[in-house]
Amino acid sequence: MKLVYRQMLSFFLVICTLMVILTATYIQVTNTTLYHQTWDQLTTDSDTLMMDAVQYDFSNQELKGLKMQTLNANAQLLSRQNVHFTIYTPAKKVSFSSNGFRPSLTKDDWATVKRGKTIHKRLDAAPFRHDNSSRQMTEVIRPYIYQNKLIAVVATGTFVSTINQNRQQILINMLKCIALAAAVTLVMSYILSRQMTKRIKKMQKAATQIARGDYDIHLQTPSSDELDDLGRDFNKMADSLQASQEEIARQQERQQKFMADAAHEMRTPLTTINGLLEGLAYDAIPEEDKKHSIQLMQADTQRLIRLVNNTLDSEKLRTNQLTLRRTIFNGTEELHNLADQLKEKAAASGDVIKVDAPKLVRVYADYDRFVQIMFNIIQNAIQFTDQGTVTLAASREPHGATFSVTDTGIGMTKEQVDHIWDRFYKADRSRMNTQYGESGIGLSIVKQLVDLHGGKITVDSKHGVGSQFTIYFPDRDYAPANNGTKSQD
């Protein structure tokens, strides 16, 4: 069975069940109300009879008699309304009987009326003496007391069939209303079910489009019901899938570019090494130049090793396979060590390395990766500075440590600053083949390593003036325990 019909059936059954319950309750209440209204009317008739027909001697406080003519007239009038009555004396004798109506009063009934209480009987088999029949009646047995003395008891009754006829007519009317309501319910349930199923079909159609690879989908969700909540989640899913597809495409493009760039970077040193080896093999290089050729091959080999190592580090970072082992150590001491390691490279370009930092600057980081970060930045500063100064600085912050590398080199434009974190990007391509010029992958690794530490790296550069790299490492309590990679403290 389709959803629309199941929803229609559920709506129809719920509403019909509610209508049946309400109808049954209404009939029960109506039945009770009919009896009470009948009893009220019988009570009124009884009071009217006593007022019109009873002759009472108030001086002797006794019943003198009944006005038979008046009683007969009232009996005829009430019989047309299916109302009959009997008047009893306090001695339990019948003073007057309408159409032979003689209900039986039990001892309990007499005891009740003598206490001045009116009796209401819903169902009683009352005899009619004139035709020796017994009929189902509803009765009111009402005592009349004057000055604490019972003077008469009037039993007034009407046929239960009269009440049943009224109840049956009400039931017929109710059934007509139920039939009409059921028809309206069927139509309304169909309309509501169609509205819901239309919205579900839209989602189904959208899901089919997504299954075919079309993620450019947006469902309209104007309201705030559960289906629209589902629609909004569906839109988020579609957007996420679209973003994932775009990211996959970007990653594939980056992968292709990476392979092309890596091949390009390796081609130059491999070509140099191959040419030198051929020259040595065919004895085409003079004896006095062989040593220099070997030195060139060693330099290009080391360059290839660094390129491979950097490439492996980059892939480990990209696939979250790098493990950080963070400890607390003196960052100033490591700056001095790096300055000593790179002073010869700096001197080759006419540069001077200065360290401007307190004796102790605590830093919480992976020692080897800290050295790798600072080494790459310092080497980068030396690479783009001639006859200048490279200043290394360090300081403590409230929740971490800050290190900076400032040079007086060629500087960078804003466009160059925006791209220096891209893999294989070189701010000055004319220096790509210098002694210390690398592949352009080093700063990309630096940025990723700083991010893994939960730190921050910024660049302030002015073309023709110089550049300043600033790195912030947070303390233990402020560094992420796991930022997409393994971490050991």
Image (cartoon, rainbow, N blue to C red):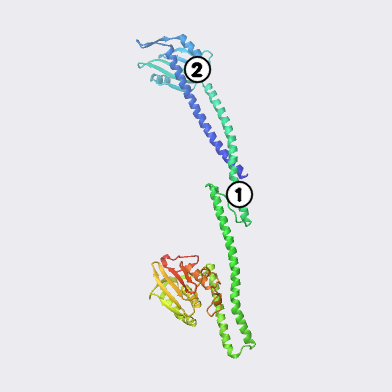
Asked whether the viewer can see residue 99, the reply is no
Position of the N terminus by quadrant: top right
Task: Give the residue displayed 44% in from the left and 15% down from the top.
Answer: 48
Amino acid type shown at disc 1: Lys
Q: Is residue 394 above or below residue 125?
A: below
Residue at label 2?
83
Q: Secondary structure at mark 2?
A: strand
Residue at label 1?
202
Query: Where residue 426 sits in the image (x, y, percent)?
Result: 54, 73
Task: Say few, some or many: other residues with alpha carbon within 10 Å of mark 2 (under 14 / 14 to 19 / 20 or more).
Answer: many
Q: Secondary structure at mark 1?
A: helix
- Please say if the residues under marks 1 and 2 sit with CB atoms less than 8 Å apart: no
Query: Where residue 36 sits in the image (x, y, percent)?
Result: 47, 24
Query: Where residue 234 sits in the image (x, y, percent)?
Result: 56, 53
Tell me how many marks there are: 2
User: Which numbered circle lies on residue 40?
Assistant: none
How far is mark 1 from mark 2, CA to CA? Answer: 69 Å
Query: Where residue 115 sits in the image (x, y, percent)?
Result: 38, 20
